[in-house]
Amino acid sequence: MKIFYNTSIKKNYQNSLIAIGNFDGVHSGHKKILNNGIKKARKIKRKFGVLTFEPLPVMFFNKKIKNHRLDDLKQKIVNLKNENLDFIIIQKFNKKFSKINYKNFISKILFKKLRCKYIYVSKNFKFGNKREGNIKKLMQSQKKYLFKTVITQPVKKNKKIISSTMIRKLLKRGKIEKVNNLLKREWAVYGKVIKGERRGRKLGFPTCNIDLKNYMTPRLGVYAVKVKIDKVLKKGIANVGYRPTFNGKKLLLEVNIFGIKKNLYNKNLNVIFNKFIRPEKKFKNIKQLKQQIKKDIKLAKSNV
């Protein structure tokens, strides 16, 4: 799979079928759309790719939106690659790009640069400066710019549309099993181990601390997890929260990896969420906290 970091793509990737969107999470709804596009591309002997944006436009326009993403960019690339695409275009979404009006987006990007033959978009797709472009305007341009618009149909489960928004809401409620079912994989946070206050080590349960950055914040509390370190997969337990027993102020993901006691500072970990165990709570004293951690670990070991 070829990755382009702007819309100036090589000629042999032009005249292709392209799906446009954020594809945050690459969930089962996305997968069906991509699969349909790939089947069509193979049938007419063309390439199929995705045009996506970095950062997510909603986060670019509203700087107050934090802890929103289901995947970071590296995970998104891996998840899209797993769908057997021919290429991905990761367009930097900045002030200059956001100012392109919808007519120029169609004529200069979709036609002149990409030379799309088929464009796969959702029915509420908006594009161009001030989101003035829409499906109607895209379809009005088809004949002039020699492409066909395919309006993708939403995928439903239990009569509800599968979307990144739905998955975020489930994460907020700690419904990890449901999230993983909709993703058709396990939700994970990828990040670098940072230095903490070493309280876990003093308690006898050393943890690796990871800043959630722009990841969606799941329900605060304790989770059974698996942790991938390089190519090694280990079981573990994680806490997402502020450590109220110690009056913590910073949101952190703290992971206790079973069977590992060595220093992992600056190591990149992939923390894979399996089951929500309990909400975060403030304990009266350290003794109570340690007793609860032992119970949590026992429960976590039976759920991963």
Image (cartoon, helix red, strand yellow):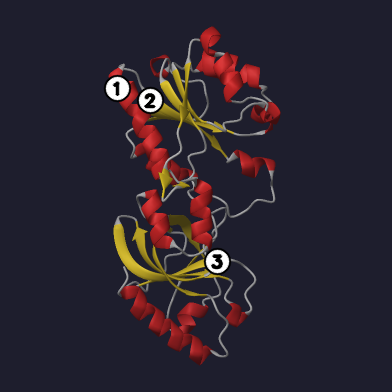
User: Mark 3 or 2 closer to N-term?
Assistant: 2
Residue 48's tag is 2
Amino acid type, residue under disc 1 in the picture: Arg
* Secondary structure found at label 2: strand
User: Mark 3 or 1 closer to N-term?
Assistant: 1
- Residue 3 in the image: state x and y as whole percent: 42, 31
Residue 42's tag is 1
- Residue 16 in the image: state x and y as whole percent: 41, 19
Label 3 vs label 1: CA separation? 45 Å
User: Mark 2 or 1 closer to N-term?
Assistant: 1
- Give the residue pinned by disc 3: 252
Pick the front one: 49 or 206: 49
Q: Residues within 10 Å of mark 1 (few under 14, many from 20)?
A: few
Vertical relation: 291 (above or below) 93: below
Q: Residues within 10 Å of mark 3 (few under 14, many from 20)?
A: many
* The quadrant where residue 231 appears: bottom left
Q: Are marks 2 and 1 in contact (CB under 8 Å)?
A: yes
Vertical relation: 110 (above or below) 304: above
* The quadrant where residue 155 appears: top left
* Secondary structure found at label 1: helix
Question: Image point 54% across, 55% down: which residue?
Answer: 216
- Residue 162 in the image: state x and y as whole percent: 45, 46
Vertical relation: 196 (above or below) 38: below
Q: Residues within 10 Å of mark 2 (few under 14, many from 20)?
A: many
